[in-house]
Amino acid sequence: MKLSQLATIRVNYPEAHFWIVRRGSAERCGEPTREFNPEHIGIRIEKTDILLPDYLFYVMMHVHHCGYWKQIVTGSLSLVNIQVSDVRNIKLSPR
């Protein structure tokens, strides 16, 4: 199952539960935040009976700290970005 099946994911989304930094340094790109910025990728969980927003926030923190985003960022050395489709295509699997 992909994240896009459980959540609405887009930029300029003030109603989101949290946001992913879309553009910046390789260290910061992909970092989850609770502060709205129209440039960040907003994630709002629609199926909260399956996935809790706070749980996903901490999962995304783990994904960022493990360096997942560094493998797929595009751009120059000083300014990189991820795409909304990169977040939508994250695969979730039950254990």
Image: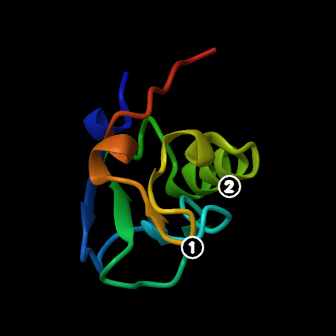
Instruction: Check the image and report above or below for 1 versus 8.
Output: above
Which color scheme is applied?
Answer: rainbow
Residue 61, labelled with which disc?
2
Q: Which residue is located at x 56 percent, y 49 percent?
A: 56
Residue 2, labelled with which disc?
none
Q: Which residue is located at x 42 percent, y 84 percent?
A: 36
Q: Quadrant of the C terminus?
A: top right
Three-letter amino acid code of the residue under disc 1: Thr
56 displayed left or right of 36: right
Q: Which residue is located at x 56 percent, y 18 percent?
A: 94
Residue 82 coordinates in the image, percent (x, y): 41, 55
Instruction: Check the image and report above or below for 15 versus 26.
Output: below
Residue designated by label 1: 33
Tell me the quarter of the picture where residue 67 sits.
top right
Residue 79 coordinates in the image, percent (x, y): 49, 71
Crowd around label 1: few <14 · some 14–19 · many ≥20 (10 Å): some
Q: CA distance from mark 2 to mark 1?
A: 9 Å
* Count of marks placed on residues: 2
Residue 2 coordinates in the image, percent (x, y): 36, 28
